[in-house]
Amino acid sequence: MIYKAGSYDVIVIGAGHAGCEAALAAARMGCKTLMVTMSMESIALMPCNPSIGGPGKAQVVREIDALGGEMGINVDKASVQMRIINTGKGPAVQALRAQADKDEYHKEMLKTLLDERNLDILVAEVEEIETSDSRVTGVITKTGAWFACKAVIITSGTYLKGRIIIGDLAFDGGPGNQFPSIKLSDSLQKLGLKMGRFKTGTPPRINKKSVDFSKMIEQPGDERSLRFSFVSPRMERPQLSCWLTHSTGITHQIVRDNLDRAPMFSGVIKGKGPRYCPSFEDKVVRFADKDSHQLFVEPEGRATDEMYIQGLNTSLPEDVQVQILKSVPGLENVRIMRTGYAIEYDYVVSSQLKLTLETIQVEGLFTAGQINGTSGYEEAAAQGLIAGINAALKVQEKEPLILKRSEAYIGVLIDDLVTKELDEPYRLLTSRAEYRLLLRQDNADLRLTETGYKIGLVNEERWHTYQEKLHILENERTTLKRTTFTPADKNIAEFLASKNSAVLRDRISLWEMLRRPELKIEDFVRLGLISDNDLDILEQLEIQTKYEGYISKQKEQVQRFEKMESRHIPDDINYDDVYGLSNEALQKLKQFRPHSIGQASRIAGVNLADINVLLIFFEKQRRK
Amino acid sequence: MFDDDIAAISTPPGEGGIAIIRLSGSEVIEKANRVFKPRRLGVDLTQKEGYSLTLGWIVDGEEFIDETLVSIMRAPRSYTGEDVVEINCHGGTLPARRCLETVLKTGVRIAEPGEFTRRAFLNGRLDASQAEAVIEIIRAKTDKGLSLALKQLSGKNSNHFHELEDSLISINAMVEASLDFPDEVGEPDYGEVKSMFASIIGKIDQILAAGKRAEIYREGISIAICGKPNVGKSSLLNALLKKDKAIVTNIPGTTRDIVEDFINVRGIPVRLMDTAGIRATEDVVERIGVERSHEVIQSADLVIFLLDIETGITEEDLAVYESIENRHVIVLVNKEDLEEKRISEAQLEDLFKEVKVIRGSVKEDIGLEELEASIENMVLSGEVQADDMEIMLNMRQKQALLKARKHIEDALFALEDVPLDCLGVDIWGALESLGEITGKNLKEEVLDRIFHDFCIGK
Ligand SMILES: Nc1nc2c(ncn2[C@@H]2O[C@H](COP(=O)(O)OP(=O)(O)OP(=O)(O)O)[C@@H](O)[C@H]2O)c(=O)[nH]1
Ligand SMILES: [Mg+2]
């Protein structure tokens, strides 16, 4: 029996990383919001690896933070280790990575959600999205509760028709032993959404007590206190180490001997898996000449014995998993705590989305996270945030928020999603960002705090702190440019000599001197030439001086890029009316419905002549 | 894309006649002015009004490329509705191409097919009813350009481009894999990166040289013979032509006008020009002849400078040499058969540093073979048939290759001083430039390569 259970502005289905950000954003922007989850335990669950950040992803977490999202703050509360990756490879790819305590991560997020005034949580399974005139009107749960709403955000991750595969065993299920969501996928299909099927996998978890760490290499965290969020307090907390070991010739032999039992190769698994995250059996087969692969053993939390084995995701039968593990140095006496598995799931083909993450077919229906064919907690959270923001803006009848490729990884991510045809789960890489040097983790706040403030997610206090930072930066920049030295300055000459740095020939400013690769800003702080500011400020100044040339090169590229992006294509364009498009372009433009000329030019199959045709069409329309 | 500065040769390619280079965009007048040397001193293109004509030279630094008539049209009263410059080149296709290349060096980019027409339409210079016609023009030009480019890239030459593409993808993959998958892929070996850069530059140079060779064999070059009167210029022309085309006497000032004919030097078509001997003179006819000599010498691809061993190096010789010093020159010391030798080896070495000097005698046919060899050597930049590559490059391809090369050079230069992500800017830039030629999205191929070459995966 269906009954009217209530009414909300925004309903979020799913409580993973996308769902949490979406619900918080909508609620904080003043929308009456309901978050529907299949269980309280699955809120902010990390069903795969226990880490957040790394190249491309750390930048996203910082962007989420600058916009007023939660992921950065939450992982700062729940981390057991922090490290900076890629330290020697330049500012654009330096990336913070945290090992998180999964349980703490869940609990801290839950606390934040419960604290939110405008947000209700409901444990239920949504089976149907209700629409009228291709517009969302409500949702109906399995148990018959009918909620009216103005916008729905689906963030159901890999739960849609989830199917777990372990060897010859296969059963319906969601990640982390949760239930799958079967009917929702059909409901989406009924609404006209095209669905695809992907696969991903996770390694077995082992009991810490059964590991011989003396045979592994310890990987401790960084000594300094690191944080994702620009507003988290700097805290020293005890860190847990990760451990490095490796597979052996015996391991690989075991895999080869059991390939006939591997669903990857027997044809049981049909969904396409990500190339950047192949199963272990895949690695052994494809890189047959390698006699060893790295394996990282990572803690899943402080209060649990469970450890995650990065590098060993597999869907081989459980007995083979045990054999494999025991052939690894340090794991001779290992005891499994959780079996590795592959999971297949339905996803929404993302070319059906607008840059706001609203579906083209159904007004008011948004999708975010793994349901859109992406992988990764960070990618999911970013989409959740953008979908939450845009759902709220839509409810409030305000202009949508679209981040450009030139201003955020989040922009790169969403633009890629809506302009590309995915043939594997999508993961962010720094190499996907053409303006990588501008989209750094260190300057995410400079890029996006103002946007976050304007939409109302960045509060006054944070805004004030940010303004202060801007002020200090500006002052310091002026000082650096004004402070100059001549070859006659003895102290400087001595200092340069001690650093093996060339002697001065002419008067030179501190700003210019900092460009020298061998000179570090801390040296100048120690000399008393630069005031001992917060680390963030010093880092910012150093990057701005050292990489000025490359940064301005990229800024020029951005100017050219943005000219194309700013030519909008009206939503109601009928491509059949456009004279002169090639057949392929016509079909692709109808499918992707790009937002701008720039986006259209990135669609495979739309070439320069087609772009010209569009430009001429718009001009003709304008003159009418 | 919308209002940046563009240029292209707007007359159909063909033999002789006048070729027009059209420029359009907000800064084209200023940029054209940078490579323009007016006939009348003090004339400045940027000060000229719309629909004006100015006579002068297109110059690349010190080098005179061609004598041109430049017309200026100011926005919005021009074909495209933007500022437009049209450079009318006298010398036909080859000099026109050189002029265009010179213009491109100022930061003007080569226009896309049909781009002038599109701009004209978008800027309201063409009637709305012409929209469909405009589209037809753009489509036709794009498709034609595409099929031509594809033809050139297929078959015998394709593997040269593929090799280049392959090394660029592979170096990109190496760098990007290290940046995005630090757990699995270590830092690239800088020694290896360096040698890869060097080999990429080598490959680009090879393709460019082959393209230039093909251009030279197809279009030919012009050579001017110059020197003071009576050094044997006309004699040399006749000897190379193997016929008595020019009048030869022992009276200085015999040749009064340009005498020209076509020959073939080792397969290269050459337009050979004999000039009036250069000297100060009161004779009106001779003076005009000398003026013409100067013009011809300035626009020739190569100048053969003759000296007379009997008279020695005189003030007149020095004056002539001063005017050709910055051009491609071969010096021929003539009349070696005579007893009286007033030019010493030391003198030559002192005067002509890094310039090819040949000693010989036109009369006795000494040194002429060496002269031909030097001509070939010089126009083919010393890379005479070092390989059997046969590549015709169009202007767009050549520009794209030059851009790619510049990126790799920058990366090589910065290699030791900047981190990998900065290097990535140029390495990626090079790949993008090459993509302009092959029309492929090489970024996706880099990803494919990463997953193929490196075992990545958590
Ligand atoms: N002995 C000797 N005489 C030469 C040689 N080459 C040219 N002559 C003579 O030099 C004289 C001038 O030759 P031209 O070829 O008319 O000289 P030119 O440089 O064209 O002179 P103008 O046209 O007057 O500038 C003629 O008498 C030639 O026979 C040579 O190699 N040896
Ligand atoms: Mg003569």
Image (cartoon, rainbow, N blue to C red):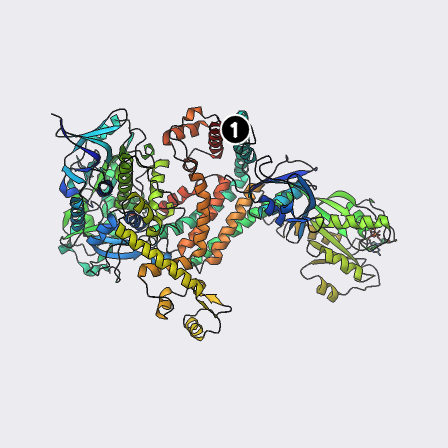
- Work out whether residue B249 or residue A155 is closer to the camera in this orientation and state it: A155
Please give left or right for residue B61 compared with residue A152 in the image.
right
Q: Using residue B330 as the reference point, say whether residue A142 is left or right of it.
A: left
The chain containing the residue under callout 1 comes to: B
Who is closer to the viewer here, A124 or A425?
A124
Closest to the observer, B274 or B319: B319
Q: In the visual, does B251 lie left or right of A327?
A: right
Quarter residue A357 falls in: top left
Task: Estimate the x, y position of residue B365 in percent, counting from the top left.
Answer: 79, 53
The residue that label 1 is drawn on is: B135
Residue A497 image point, x, y percent? 43, 72
Callout 1: few (<14), some (14-19), or many (20+) C-alpha neighbours within 10 Å?
many
Image quadrant in which you'd find residue A177:
top left
Mark 1: which amino acid?
Ile
- Residue B211 % position (x, y): 59, 44
Quarter holding residue A388: top left
Please tell me which residue lies in front, B373 or A174: A174
Residue A210 picture location, percent across and down: 14, 55
Question: Would residue A291 be visible to someone looking at this image?
Answer: no
Question: Does the beta carbon of the residue at mark 1 sit less than 8 Å from ligand 2?
Answer: no
**Res B361 visible:** yes
Total labels drawn: 1
Does dot 1 land on a helix, a strand or a loop?
helix
